[in-house]
Image (spheres, rainbow, N blue to C red):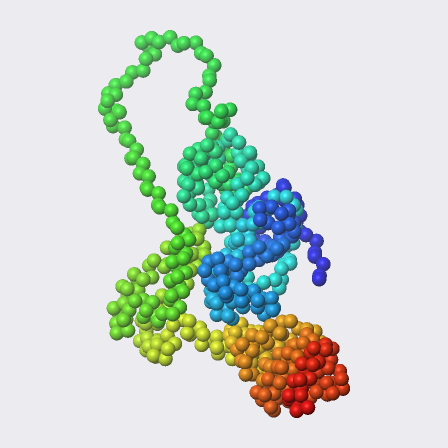
Amino acid sequence: MKPRPVPTISGDLATTSIASLLWSLRQRGLTGTLALHGECHAGVSAGETLLTFEGGALTQIRQPQPLDTLGCLLREHGAITGEQFDESLARLAAREGLQGDILVAMGACGPEAVVRGLRAQLRRKAMRVFALEKGRMEFFRGCDLLAGFGGARHPEDLLPLLWPGLRAYPEHGAVTAAVTKLGAHALRLKPSTELSAFGFEGAERSAIERLQAGPAAFAALESTGATTASVRALVALLLITGLAELSTDAPPRSASGVQPVFQQRPLEAPRRISSSNLPIVRDLGVRASARPQPPPQVIPPRPAPIDVRARMAAAEARLASMQDETYFQMLGLDASMLAQDFRTPYQERVAPWRPEAAPESAIALREVHQQIHALLDEAHTTLSDEASRRRHLTEIMQGAGTPNVRRGQAAQADAATKLHTAQVCLRCGAIDEAGKAAREALMLRGDLPDAIVVLVTTLFAKDPHGPCIEALGWVNRGLKLAPDSDQMHVLAGRAHARRGDSARALEHFYRAYKINSTNMDAVRELRVAAARHRSGGGAVAGAGATETSTGGKLLAKIFGR
């Protein structure tokens, strides 16, 4: 393991809060790794948590313990079943790859669901980090300490994470320090366009609107309907990010917390009133009526709160159903309609799914809207062109008119190309390249026994004498796909022989021989086992007494002696 470089910045979490660290990293657009060494608190395990950033965006988090796994999140959101989750864990233990790749290869879910799950996983991991209160931090600028950890990265903007992170822990020391700093003063907002990105809703949005109307004290923010915990988190957010400041114009609060209505003034001698110092007012009624009156202030009704979870579930369900629909079905059109007749239906279908129709703070919902809008736009473009329309009708007649079918055909073609590359590389002795191409083929299609044969062969070549547990997992999977493959049984025999299980090894060699008597690998293994048995050394070197007896009976059955 390479030694770590000297950290660019280091400090104590007791004096530098997580929220201020993340805000600073985002505002400066830094790239590097943040190492947090904290104690076990509020669901965060003791140990080191690593966060990587690229251009101020969060890209990856590694926790001390795997608290938020991808499979658990996908099962929690109904993207996979419990049986699929259990099978993915078994394959993960067999080192068949990353869990997301395994689930796609199993056909449990699509790549889009995995990407959404990875984004949700990253956001949930980030929420746990806000609980850290004691410990130390180190930042390694320009250094990626998580290189090779996990799969493809999907950067997340830190701005929408700050508010839910602080709101989740309203009694955190950083929140308490901000509220103490506010004290009896009023809070004044600075001009900013970033407030909408935090995703304020309900009573918290009312508190922001109160601040936009002018400086407000803590009690005034509570009077908007927001809870004390929410107001505490809101004050901390605005002061930590510098989007608000303490107001010096507001009069100080009294000790009781009630703003004094009257201010005491020194007593003055009463003024003598005479007719000479009385003001002269003429046409008071005319002047008063002529004075222009300001128009009454119209306060628009506050929009009803948006149920983002319900809308997200509906959007994901619609996106999933569109994967098995033709372009005509997506737009609700009949194949006999002309292009000029379905512009209005298209506009009606696409309007609710425009990205801007989703709340600005609901980033994940906007992404699903974007995918639905892209499919509808693609359908409209295809059906508007006569040649493209005819091609699509031909696809429908051939049973290939839906995105899922087209995606499956493309994956099948790509997997065949990768498999051919793997086989060529294996024949040329390029073991690493062959193994990589075989894995890529299995990622595209998990039901390719020939790709499993290539991959297991490369695993044996890289580890000539070890037990190679990963190879055994792949072989078992291959036997389920192709139980009558003589090549697969030879590989299974070798895998069991490496683990010292000679009886099972001989069974697989014998099965391979029965399936294909010209398989020289199977014949050679059986003859070697027979020679060892005749010499008294057991069917396989290192076999126990029981295995020797079992192997001897099998060899007698095979060779008739």
Q: Which x, y percent locates residue 75?
A: 49, 60
Can the viewer see residue 35 in this picture? no
Q: Quadrant of residue 133?
A: top right
| 386 is higher (above) or lower (below) than 47 | below
Q: Position of residue 270 (x, y in %)?
A: 41, 9
Q: Residue at x 25, y 21 (%)?
A: 284
Q: How many marks?
A: 0
Give the answer, above or below, for where 199 lies relative to 257: below
Is residue 104 something one can see in this rendering? yes
| Horizontal arrangement in the rendering, residue 334 relative to residue 256 (left or right) | left
Q: Quadrant of residue 56?
A: bottom right
Residue occupying the point 31% across, 36% down: 297
Residue 444 against residue 294 in the figure, above or below: below
User: In which quadrant is the N terminus drawn?
Assistant: bottom right
x and y percentages locating residue 521 in the rendered image: 65, 86
Figure quadrant of the C terminus: bottom right
Residue 189, x across and y down, in percent: 47, 39
Say which residue appears at 41% left-offset and 74% top-offset.
405
In the rendered view, does 97 fall on the left or right side of 322? right
At a point 45% along the width and 56% down the height, the residue shown is 364
Which quadrant of the figure has residue 365?
bottom left
Q: Nearer the viewer, residue 80 or 98?
A: 80
